[in-house]
């Protein structure tokens, strides 16, 4: 039941976005809840991890390093180029780049499972990318944005430490120590994480009601382009290096899906409400696109299996 509800994330996101647009008063007072809600998401991610996930980095350090390198090369550069090509205004430009500079999204593990990819590798990459974000996200944000908007490097680093790293570590510690005893409670966290992200998106929509009609199709297309190129390059580059299909799928999903909730929180804290819009759009779109991609991979595997090729 919980899994079915979480798979309907795009539907819930759209429903809550419409509620927020037409009944803004419900959500506008929740602006201060964005950071705590994102911390809940990160704590939930930690509750899916154990210290063994980090030990696996030592077993295949080259592959993990390769995945992290692609994450922080492909997405920030792609986001910067796309935002420049579409000549986005400063606020939206910053929002798109912030999405690109964020670590991989927590939903990527589910999508890798649905797409017959390597779930263990996905979990390890998501965790490693999240820890790397403490340094990588402020560095790349400053690198690509400082000539366009003021980027508070140290403030961003401290925020990511508080919003992301500490909750993930706390969740991992609790799961490692008490995993079996809290199994039933732990199963609720994917649903809680989904609800937290949905509410974050709704708050952004409510706060940006006046700006939403100003966000033209170009902005939406730019967000879709960043996501699509992330999947494509994240899949094709490992393939060039002769990695197997499951590894290519995993890195493709990991690179293409972003922690857009983090980009939203940073945008509101350090830039503007409108800079948070690309993250909100990305959050909805990436779950739709990843679900379609995972479904297509699963379908092609089934057809090959039926044909006797697997």
Image (cartoon, rainbow, N blue to C red):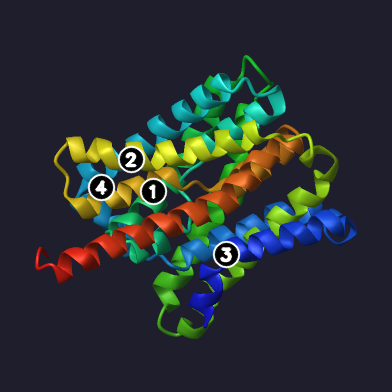
Q: Residue under circle 1?
A: 254
Q: Residue at x 38, y 50 (%)?
A: 253
Q: Residue under circle 4?
A: 248
* Residue 175 x, y percent position in the rendering: 44, 72
Label annotation for residue 9:
3
Q: Please, is residue 21 above or below residue 211 in the view?
A: below
Q: Distance between the residues labelled 4 and 2?
A: 7 Å
* Residue 39 x, y percent position in the rendering: 62, 57
Residue 106 is at least partly visible in this image: yes
Q: Which residue is drawn at 72% across and 32% down?
A: 271
Task: Classify 10 Å Cα crowding around label 1: few (below 14), some (14-19), many (20 and above).
Answer: many
Is label 1 in a helix, a strand or a loop?
A: helix
Q: Residue under circle 2?
A: 234
Are the two marked residues, 3 and 1, in contact with CB atoms closer than 8 angstroms?
A: no
**Mark before the other along the chain sequence, 4 or 3:** 3
Q: Nearer the viewer, residue 125 or 9?
A: 9
**Mark before the other along the chain sequence, 3 or 1:** 3
* Residue 240 x, y percent position in the rendering: 18, 35
**Mark before the other along the chain sequence, 3 or 2:** 3
* Residue 49 x, y percent position in the rendering: 40, 64
Is label 3 in a helix, a strand or a loop?
A: helix
Q: Residue at x 34, y 46 (%)?
A: 252
Are the two marked residues, 4 and 3, in contact with CB atoms closer than 8 angstroms?
A: no
């Amino acid at each position: 039941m919980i899994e079915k509800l979480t798979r309907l994330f795009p539907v819930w996101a759209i429903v809550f976005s419409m509620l927020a647009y037409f009944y803004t008063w419900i959500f506008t007072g929740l602006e201060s809840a964005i950071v705590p809600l994102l911390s809940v998401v990160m704590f939930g991610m930690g509750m899916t991890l154990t210290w063994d996930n980090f030990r696996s980095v030592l077993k295949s350090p080259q592959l993990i390093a390769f995945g992290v390198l692609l994450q922080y090369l492909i997405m920030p550069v792609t986001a910067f180029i796309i935002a420049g090509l579409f000549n986005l205004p400063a606020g939206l430009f910053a929002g798109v780049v912030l999405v690109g500079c964020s670590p991989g999204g927590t939903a990527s593990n589910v999508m890798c499972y649905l797409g017959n990819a390597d779930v263990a590798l996905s979990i390890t990459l998501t965790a490693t990318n999240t820890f790397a974000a403490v340094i990588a996200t402020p560095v790349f944000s400053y690198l690509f944005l400082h000539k366009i908007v003021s980027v508070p490097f140290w403030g961003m680093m401290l925020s990511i430490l508080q919003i992301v790293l500490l909750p993930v570590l706390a969740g991992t510690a609790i799961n490692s120590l008490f995993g079996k005893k809290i199994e039933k409670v732990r199963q609720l966290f994917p649903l809680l994480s989904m609800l937290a992200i949905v509410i974050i998106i709704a708050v952004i929509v409510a706060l940006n009601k006046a700006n939403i009609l100003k966000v033209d199709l170009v902005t939406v297309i730019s967000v879709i382009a960043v996501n699509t190129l992330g999947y494509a390059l994240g899949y094709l580059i490992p393939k060039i290096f002769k990695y197997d299909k499951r590894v290519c799928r995993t890195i493709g999903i990991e690179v293409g899906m972003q922690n857009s909730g983090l980009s939203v929180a940073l945008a509101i804290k350090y830039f503007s409400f409108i800079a948070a819009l690309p993250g909100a759009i990305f959050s909805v779109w990436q779950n739709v696109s990843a679900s379609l991609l995972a479904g297509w991979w699963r379908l092609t595997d089934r057809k090959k299996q039926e044909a006797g090729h697997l």
